[in-house]
Amino acid sequence: MLIPCPFCGPRDAAEFTYRGDAAPVRPADDAGEAAFADYVYLRDNPRGEITELWYHRAGCNGWLVVTRNTATHEIAAARLAAAPVPAPIRETAE
Amino acid sequence: MRYSALSLLRNAFSGHQKWPQAWRKPHPKPFYSVVIVGGGGHGLATAFHLARDYGIRDIAVVEKGWIGSGNAGRNTTIIRSNYLLPGNIPFYELSMKLWERQEADLDFNTMVSQRGVLNLYHSDAQRDGYARRGNAMRLHGVDAELLDEAQVRAMAPFLDFDNARFPIRGGLLQKRGGTARHDAVVWGYARAADRLGVDIIENCEVTGLVREGGNITGVETTRGAIFAGKTALAVAGNTSRVASMAGLRLPIESHALQAFVSEGVKPLIPGVITFGAGHFYVSQSDKGGLVFGGDIDGYNSYAQRGNLPVIRDVCEGGMALMPMIGRIRLLRHWGGIMDMTMDGSPIIDKTPLPGLFLNAGWCYGGFKATPASGLCFAHLLATGAPHAAARDYRLDRFARGAVIDEKGQGAQPNLH
Ligand SMILES: Cc1cc2nc3c(=O)[nH]c(=O)nc-3n(C[C@H](O)[C@H](O)[C@H](O)COP(=O)(O)OP(=O)(O)OC[C@H]3O[C@@H](n4cnc5c(N)ncnc54)[C@H](O)[C@@H]3O)c2cc1C
Ligand SMILES: [Zn+2]
């Protein structure tokens, strides 16, 4: 599997360390135990497209958000986690 | 018909053309007391114990492919009970005891072979860790022996004892551990359950869970709806997918694990040997092939096939441990999808939805668990209460902070 690092180009997956699903977001400090248990332990674990965090350990040391298909291992996109999230495409009013 | 020397002789006279079918191919009925989803080892063992030990005969096992097409037919067949934590040891030891009488229980040759499982250690610290594990096992009545280097040399002289980086200092041996033939385990449970009246329905994929009010009352399948008093999931790597049909999110990620078999060679490897300084383990099948494996691939996958970095890593481990295997050719390799939990331990429990029961989270070690998993899940389904040996395998243990984390890795499934 080749991961297209935006900084280093396509590189062997063995250069990267996997963190997991990028979807869970750390709850506010006062969100309560149930919200934290959900954040730490529960996962959607989809068959199909997932966004996930990979760390380019043997490369640029960057954290990437990779969009990958868990059924085919096909990678659709990779961006630096630090990069601004692309804004959703909106219809522009006249 | 019971399998016996007499039945073998009688069938020899008819040229082995008249053996009866080992299990029927029934059409699904509209309703069963219990519908078990998943015809792997765990689903079939659950059906067997429900029917034999708890007197429930009105059971269907619903399997999307053929029975044993999942991990039950893909694993490296190792059975052992060399665990460390109190939540695990009694359960896996119960399983080991059930393996020891499985062939008599099932009237089937499952080729259970207690050829021993040897975990090698390579440093003083690792020896101390294994001594601790061995002591924990012995406190629970499980056999464990700590071997020094000379004792390991006597057992397996071909290992690279004087490896510059990872010299072999000794090992922890569980003599009662070993291997069993995985396909035979599936067939044995299927045949025994079928003889007790269980309907095994193959080529029948569950596509939805029937909900009435808050309750789960059956399954939608590719062969129509089947209603059930209780619906029991035993779908291993597909647990999150099937549970999501009822809106459940679980502490599980699906990961690929690969296995490898070499060309056949003369008897070489005594028992099962595991490398302690990397991830590589090996045994030898009765056909002569070396059966070996290592780490999971390490990222979420439903692909049932693996990638090259792990193949390289496994082969490097093998070369570090027994350099002679560099001359042996690889015959085939494949992958299966593991239901990896957040603490590396399984779940046998009710779910928040009445009528829906869960058996999951077996990670890469659920083959050895098959008999006890079947017994304990059947106990839960029949009595509504957890079996004593599986009482810590609760779904809410994560939220309660009562995780059973053998490796001490935390909530990172690919590291368990
Ligand atoms: C390469 C490899 C090596 C392993 N080595 C070992 C080992 O040495 N020792 C050990 O103890 N364990 C080992 N394991 C783990 C062990 O194989 C599994 O933990 C165990 O088999 C899981 O339980 P099961 O047998 O019920 O699973 P499975 O056989 O996977 O059964 C689940 C079944 O559910 C079916 N299913 C899924 N979705 C649906 C649906 N929607 N409708 C109907 N049916 C469905 C699947 O087709 C499958 O047949 C290994 C696994 C792999 C892949
Ligand atoms: Zn990079």
Image (spheres, rainbow, N blue to C red):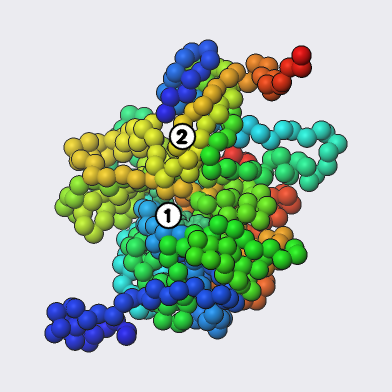
Q: Residue furthest right?
A: A30
Pointer 1: what residue?
Answer: B71
Q: Residue furthest front?
A: A94
Q: Amino acid at mark 2?
A: His
Q: Amino acid at mark 1?
A: Asn
The answer to whether residue B151 is left or right of residue B57 is left
Please, which chain is the residue tagged with disc 1 on?
B
Pointer 2: what residue?
Answer: A73
Q: Can the viewer see residue B270? A: no
Does the beta carbon at disc 1 come under 8 Å from ligand 1? Answer: yes
Residue depicted at x 47% and y 63%: B204
Please, which chain is the residue tagged with disc 2 on?
A
SS under mark 2: loop
The percent coordinates of residue B281 (x first, y second) are 36, 46
The percent coordinates of residue B203 (x first, y second) are 43, 62
The alpha-carbon separation of the residues under discs 2 and 1 comes to 20 Å
- Quadrant hosting ligand 1: bottom left
B104 shown above or below B332: below
The percent coordinates of residue B410 (x first, y second) are 62, 41
SS under mark 1: helix
Q: Can the viewer see residue B394? A: yes
B244 shown above or below B101: above
Residue depicted at x 39% and y 62%: B66
Q: Disc 2 vs disc 1: which is toward the camera?
A: 2
Of residue A9 and residue B374, the one placed in the foreground of this image is: A9
B321 shown above or below B6: above
The percent coordinates of residue B367 (x first, y second) are 44, 59
Residue depicted at x 52% and y 31%: A68
